Amino acid sequence: MRIGHPSSDTQLVLAQTRGNVAGDRAARGRDENPREERPMTDADVIIVGAGPAGLMLAAELRLAGVRPLVLERQPQRRDTPKAGGLGGQILELLRYRGLLERFEAACTDPVPAPRFPFGGVHLDFTQLADPPMHALPLPQPRLERLLDERAGELGVDIRRGHQVVGVSQDDAAVTMDVRGPDGPYRISARYLVGCDGARSRVRDWAGIGFPGTTYPEVNRLAQVTLPETVTILGNGDLDVPGFGTIRAGFTRTDHGLFGVGASPASKVVSLYTIEDESTEYDDDTPMTVTELQDSLRRVLGVQLPVGEPIRLSRFTFKARQAERYRDGRILLAGDAAHLFPATGVALNAGMLDAVNLAWKLAADIHGWAPAGLLDTYHDERHHAGTRTMLHTRAQVALRRGHDAAAEALREVFQELLADEQPLRRMGALVAGTDIRYATPGSHHHPLAGTFAPDLTLHTDHGMTSVAELLHSARPVLLDLADREDLRQTARDWQHRVDIHTAKTDDRPADALLIRPDAHIAWAATTDEPAGTAAPSLGKALASWFGTP
């Protein structure tokens, strides 16, 4: 449920509650009952790779009062737009951090209608009042600039042009050999997180297997203007001189797949080709207009004139997932942990990895993490990656078939998507909103393990929302039924968990225990007798947030 802006009183209360997130909370967290003498290290966490997953992780760690250091081998931010935007659950998470408006303001392209490609067909949500999937067209260079700025505002140290060339670990720390602009040096940290992409050296050094499949196809995606000789018809079809009409959507030929998305109101069109090709391309070598035109000619059999390029990108499809996301003090996130054979999901998955991991690393570094907390990062995000792999591999089966049986499969699948229930289910699967993490002891409540709904909240200080409460990335116990027994139980954890009392229309539970990544760790059944939920709440608090 969405709400308007909170009142000034509410904003003041929230500001007073949060304090200096990156400063006061850091000092407060480090004084909490350390279980062991901490080794002297150069940083709490070293992140290898300053892509979206690495930068998101760095910012989340600073919110949790941890000292991250980001090492990036490239001397400058990349200009190659490997991805064209964000979509799915990460957009809600950014809103829960108070960042979505900032990202939307940086988006210069109009937000497209909610219609998304799926293995050569489409998931069309345009007829739904509340689509289960949204996207924000934000080219990756612009996205990385925004995440870089956010990390800088929080005080993250980002070193560009610093390449990690060797890694070793023991029970206390990870040591890295680094080659920087001023020569080689050695550095250590409590933990190392590899966010260094598909060819992750960190993954190799940790000895983590990366099984899967590389498909023999090359995908090219472009946003270009069209010359006056090409006409965009009212239905989005293209009228190409010397060829005729190319219909909007996907066209399958003997040489590959061609896709086009166009609007008569704009001269900018999106073009897409897939060809079976064994050529190995360097990700750092940008695609050219000539390469695009050659691919269009091979697939369509005609020279399609194009004007000025706005975005050009090339990628191959791989279905690979790391066997484990953790080896001792080395962890993986983003493309280093998984590669999916479809567009539009990698950034969502990688940035959500970062949000899930950050608060658990911080808990361990501050000394209060309960046993096994950090291992839940692999359990939860490997499960989420497996779900994403499921639907992206299904897209491969839909996309790559060329015979009559494959055509029949695509036709039947598209017919199923004409019904609202299967369409919503597929939308939730692609968006990643259907993920439910295991919550031992809380499986009886349907909300346990799910992403917290953004309830409108009425408090003594005015109106606010669940999203507002999570801006500072702290755990929250939200009492929706004025349950003093639950608040009393939680007070032993109040230095780690914020306690809020509010009312909401049609409350889904008497109380919600919400983790920093916005997933519900525990929920109290509505209108249950007083005192019955307090023991299970205490167990949940100890299970996720340690000994009080």
Image: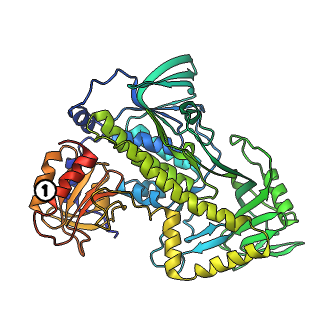
Residue 210 vs residue 432: left or right? right
- Position in image of residue 16 (x %, y %): 20, 48
> Residue 326: where, in percent of width, then height?
46, 39
Question: How many numbered dots are placed on residues in this image?
Answer: 1
- Say what secondary structure mark 1 lies in: helix
Q: Which residue is mark 1?
A: 487
Q: Amino acid at mark 1?
A: Arg
The quadrant holding residue 372 is top left
Quadrant of the image for the C terminus? top left
Q: Is residue 146 above or below residue 2?
A: above
> Residue at position x 41%, y 55% from top?
94
Q: Position of residue 289 (x, y in %)?
A: 78, 52
Left or right of residue 205, residue 19 in this image: left
Q: Is residue 38 above or below residue 79?
A: above
The image quarter in which residue 283 lies:
top right
Which residue is rendered at x = 49% and y = 74% of the image? Answer: 424
Give the quarter of the figure containing the N terminus. bottom left
